[in-house]
Image (tube, rainbow, N blue to C red):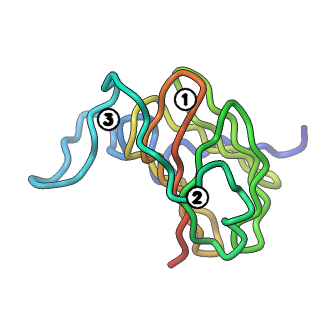
Amino acid sequence: MAAVVLALAAGGCGSGGRAPGREPAEGAAFPAPGIAGPLPEAADGGDTGACADGECEVLVTSTADITANGMDVHVTVRDDYVAFRTAGTLMQLGGGAGGRARFGDGLTATVVAHDEDDAVLRFTTS
């Protein structure tokens, strides 16, 4: 595969969006990884078409192809990571919630919640 960039530092590297060894600012809203229990309900359910305008919250089970704000994003959910692949870029966020993947056109994907094969993801534009 030509020029795949592993961009772990692009908004999160599995430590809840924090650099290794760094703690969030007091009052920061990063849920603790590994919290047991059901995932919260996604505002748009499994309707990835709701992401077309770049603003959605969806449940992804295992894999999904999402077009958000004109960008095609392939999402893979595994028990210990969520990966986002676009043309020529791969961003992999470690388990738990709070990680963010930022894409060049102002699109951000945030892991709201994550378990073995499911994740609730929020896409926003800035």
**Dot 3 surroundings within 10 Å: few (below 14), some, or many (20 or more)?**
few
Left or right relative to 103: residue 18:
left
Mark 1 lies on a secondary structure that is strand
- Quarter where residue 108 is shown: bottom right
- Alpha-carbon distance for marks 3 and 1? 16 Å
Q: Amino acid at mark 3?
A: Pro
The one of 125 and 117 positioned closer to us in this rendering:
117
| Mark 1 or 2: the one toward you | 2
| Mark 2 or 3: the one toward you | 2
- Residue 93 image position (x, y, % from top left): 52, 38
Residue 81 is labelled as 1
Q: Amino acid at mark 2?
A: Asp
Are the residues flagged by discs 3 and 1 in contact, CB closer than 8 Å?
no
| Mark 3 or 1: the one toward you | 1
- Residue 79 image position (x, y, % from top left): 55, 20
- Give the residue displayed 50% in from the left and 79% down from the top: 126
Left or right relative to 39: residue 33:
left
Task: Please give the residue where the numbered disc 3 appears in the rendered image.
Answer: 20
Task: Please give the residue where the numbered disc 2 appears in the rendered image.
Answer: 44
Left or right relative to 100: residue 48:
right
- Give the residue displayed 64% in from the left and 38% down from the top: 83
- Residue 56 image position (x, y, % from top left): 57, 64
Are the residues flagged by discs 1 and 2 in contact, CB closer than 8 Å?
no
